Structure formats: structure tokens, C-alpha cells
Amino acid sequence: MKRVLTIAGSDSSAGAGIQADLKVFAQLGVYGMSAVTAVTAQNSRGVQKIYKVAPKIVAAQIDSVVRDIGADACKIGMLYSPQVVDLVAERIERRDIKNVVVDPIVFAKDGTRLLSARAVSRMINDLLPRATLVAPNVAEAELLSGIKVTDPQSAAMAAEQISKFGPDYVLIKGGHLDGEPIDVLFDGQSAREYRGERVAGPPMRGTGCALTAAIAALLAQGHSVQDAVAFAKQFVASAIAHAVKLGKGKVSFYTGTQGEG
């Protein structure tokens, strides 16, 4: 069985973060492991509290599972502090972890800032050069590239700019664009569009988490980046279609039991 490590924050409502990642891993037939970077109190209405995990504990979690079980791929989500960004980048290098998928989470769905400006700088300098793929949403792509993203053409420009930081591939998630949700993948030389249809209903929490977790799972199983992205986009669309409305907020939740893609 292929093994995938998620390094991310814990979501008490299990709508995003490591809980969502582990649901995806289980559904796609890989063995999921986790290193928790922060503990959050959040629900369908938003984020209420965040408690950061000490970098040495994050390091110990990564070392514990990789030394014993190993990892065929790694998905990186919420890192929160610059110290943890540095630590994770160092451990990726030291433990020779391959197929690294970075979801550069800067803001929560409710707008809460989850990565400081200093931590973003550390991510650019230390983590992205070690990434197989980085997958920002529109707001994150604008922050990383300095380019306003309004359509697939500007998304391709932003992806090319972000690729200069060193990742092998850049995927701009187009779910926040107007009209058809078009994701743009840049491979260092050219851009490719992945088209889809917008699914009716309330927005699902953790779509970015589910997408990047699915990509990491497919990479662990030996699929190409291009095929992993295509599958993950279909997988998330199906997950949204089967999401369940829970809580008192205006979002739905991925259950991990439907949406096979």
C-alpha cells in the first residue's frame, strides 16, 4: 500500500485540514499519516481559535512516521508560523520526501489569515523550491505572483511567475473565478487548462484540501502530475455534488464516503 503524509492543521469540524486529507487518502486507497502544525477550533461558521504546535513537535511527528513507515508522497497544508515553514522545508530535504504537493494556505474560507507575511516569504524561499507541485487559489496566486488573476490567461501568467520560485509545477485553482471553473497547470514551459462545470448548491469546505490531497494520493500511486490533476478535479466536483449540509453556516461538508470521481 502506498503511503501519504499530510502536514497541516487540525480542523475540529473535520471539514478541512488533516481530517479532510485523511478522508481523501482512505477513499483513494492510500495509507494516510499526519503531522499536525496547528490545532484550530472551527466549524461551518468560521475559525474561532488557533493554537500553534511547537516546531520541535512538528519535526518529531514527521520523523516518527517517515523513519518507520516511509512516505511515497506528502501533502502540505496550513503551516501557520514562519518557524514551522522553515522546519517543514528542512525535514522534506533531510528525509528525502518525494512527490511534495503544497497547498499554500494563507486565508481560511471566512477570511481569517492563516499565514503571516514573514511565513509567506519563508515559503517562497525555502519550501517552494522543494515542491513537485504548488496549488494556490486565486487570492494566493495573486499574493505569490503580484499579478491580478481574473481569467485563465492571467492565471497562466501568475503560474509562470510562481514557477520561478522553483516548484516543478504550478496549478492555479480557478474555483473563485467568474464563470466556468478553469484550473491552469504550468509545467515550466507551457500552460494547460482543466475545464469543469460549476456544481449547484452551497460551497463545500476544504475543496482545496481535498484537491491537493487527491493529487498527492495519485502521485504516490505513480500517476503523472497531469493525470493526477485531471482526476483530482473530477474527484472534487463529485465530492461537492455529494456534500452534506451540516451546522448553522452556509457551507457543506465532504463526507469521504461518496464522490469517487
Image: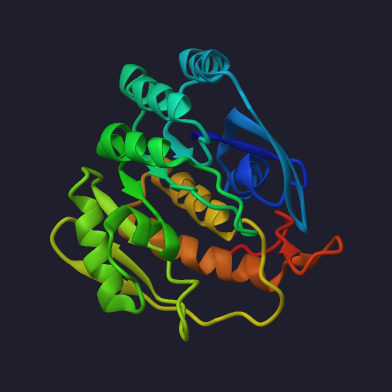
Q: Nearer the viewer, residue 245 or 194?
A: 245
User: Is residue 89 shown left or right of residue 154?
Assistant: right
- Residue 250 rendering spot, x and y as whole percentages: 76, 69
> Which residue appears at 29% of the width and 31% of the height?
126
> Which residue appears at 20% of the width and 57% of the height?
161
- Residue 192 rendering spot, x and y as whole percentages: 26, 70
Q: Using the image, determine if residue 95 lies above or below residue 199.
A: above
> Which residue appears at 45% of the width and 24% of the height?
83
Residue extending farthest to the left is: 189
- Residue 168 rendering spot, x and y as whole percentages: 23, 47
- Residue 54 rendering spot, x and y as whole percentages: 58, 18
Q: Is residue 68 at all visible to an observer of this figure?
A: yes
Q: Is residue 137 at all visible to an observer of this figure?
A: no
> Which residue appears at 65% of the width and 49% of the height?
16
Residue extending farthest to the bottom is: 179
Q: Nearer the viewer, residue 133 or 164?
A: 164
Q: Nearer the viewer, residue 226 or 142?
A: 142
Query: Residue 229 sits in which quadrant?
Result: bottom left
